[in-house]
Amino acid sequence: MQACRFRLSSLAALVFLAACSNTPSTPQLVGTVLTGVATLEAPLAGARISVADARGLIKTTTADAQGRYALEVNGLVAPLMISAVEAGNTNCNDSAKLWAKCIGALLAEVKPDRRNIANVNALSDRALGSVAQTLKHKGPQGLMDAGTTAGIDPALIRSKTDGGRKAVQQALKDAGVVDAEKFDPVTTPMQADGTGVDAVLRVLSHNRGYDNDTGVPGGTAILDADYYYVGNEEPLNLARAQAALVKAKDPAYTRILIVGDSTASTYELERLPRMGWAQVFEDQFKADAKIKVLNNAKSGRSSRNFYNQGYFRQMMQYVRPGDYVIIHHGHNDQNCDAAKPKRGAADVANMCTYPNDAQGKKQFPAGQPQMSFQNSLEVYVKEARAKGAIPIIMTPTTRVYNAARKEGFPVVPNHFTSAGQGSGGYAFVGDYSQTIKDTAKANKLPLIDVETQTIAFANAHQADWKNYWLAVDPVKFPWYATQSSGTLSKPDTTHFQEAGARAVAGMVAQGIKDSPELAALAKMLK
């Protein structure tokens, strides 16, 4: 209804419009009703909406094409917990399979015989996650799977909701939300129309975390459209995020997607000077080249769970023919030691992939081809090519390891597993870098052998390697005072600080220049 469209500017003035703005075209509902919008970067069209109460009673409905829903909740006892799960996939908790888009919200109190607003979005999910972790769940999904709000103090819900407002308050003001100080991601009226509150929600990238020890989904993490962390100490810069989103969608731009791990990631400010090479990769291109790097590389992820936890598809929604996908895994795929006491079983179930054998044959347990490293890499190749994008594959950056697999020189290749390694729980062993080369050959992919380049670089910098890998003075960078590595006395032999990140970014750029099949991209480099 056109008469229901508005720009959210004053919460007090718009309360009387809440029913109009949030209610889809449904049969007449009577008594106590929830209405709201389920949105995650865009409306969650057709999402399955479930509402659970303090006694474990559950009612369900389906959102419309604009993510709107309305549901009678007569008889339910507050607090209420609302979940929204995308249509076509119900997997919110199995890390060995592709996660659905799953978000939740907590409504502290309900006014009887009235329409109550209960929106579900990235910000409501973060508030729910904060409550869940206070109650000793690993993340929001643990509380949602419990199916009840029994014992949850409404004051705790309000406190966690209020506590998360600072991260987006200025962005809300910039979007025209006058009463941003009173914003509640659940109860503030909104439409999924790209204005007001929705203008802020559209530039947020939402993910659930991953608990290494158990493999269950962890806490909610929110990034902006440029994959920078959004939190109270690092509030959302709406103008920057909107500019990044415009470029991501602009057909005049060429997008470069980074499929990778912590060596490529973009890091939050508190972790400076730690940087991933892809965080500064866009600087390698000419200012007028119209290149947009989409760096959703994620710490601790292997090729398998990077895909299953949705990081790839978040970027793929923007891909157009002629774009590029750089595939850079190999560090975390090696987590295949089932006998490791603390996290071995979870690693094998959710993260591990096995390298090819010495003859280049794929290795995996019977009936589980997804656990082949080459097969896992080829998922990205096939999906990129299906959308007309050009996949590029890279070997992993080196660890500063000597032949004894300890910090030291000379640095030698170290991305392999062997029968005598770890706790002895490897079902298959082999060389991950060689498997990447096998994959490149089998799929006719441009290959950038950055492992060889970083080994040479490390050996040429034996005297000052700590200026490139992460080894900082915790007096200058207080965050590292509580960390187990990354300091001058205990260097991080895997990750980089800015000089190292820029050096690796330069190696990747040189690899592009050295690949004849990437000549069109090479022309855009400085």
Image: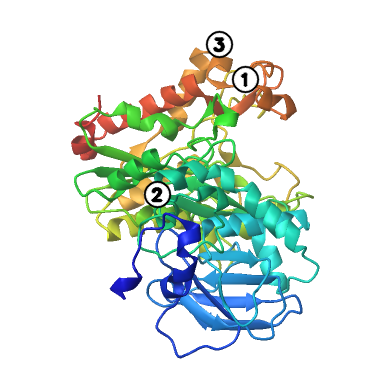
Image coords of residue 69 (percent x, y): 48, 77
Q: Earlier in the sequence, mark 3 or mark 2?
A: 2
Q: Residues within 10 Å of mark 1 (few under 14, many from 20)?
A: many
Left or right of 522? Residue 216 is right
Q: Is residue 153 visible?
A: yes
- The Cα atoms of the two marked residues, 1 and 3, are separated by 11 Å
Who's the residue at 76% across and 54% down the image? 134
Viewer-side residue, 358 vs 490? 490
Figure disc tally = 3
Image coords of residue 27 (percent x, y): 45, 90
- Indicate the amino acid at tag 2: Gly
Left or right of 521? Residue 71 is right
Q: Earlier in the sequence, mark 1 or mark 3?
A: 3
**Residue 144, placed above or below residue 171:** below
Who's the residue at 34% across and 27% down the image? 283
Residue 176, label in figure: 2
Name the residue beneath numbered marker 1.
Answer: 471
Question: SS class of the residue under badge 2?
Answer: loop
- The Cα atoms of the two marked residues, 3 and 2, are separated by 50 Å
Name the residue beneath numbered marker 3.
Answer: 464
Whether pointer 2 and pointer 1 mark residues with C-beta atoms closer than 8 Å, the reply is: no
Q: Residues within 10 Å of mark 3 (few under 14, many from 20)?
A: few
- Indicate the amino acid at tag 3: Asp
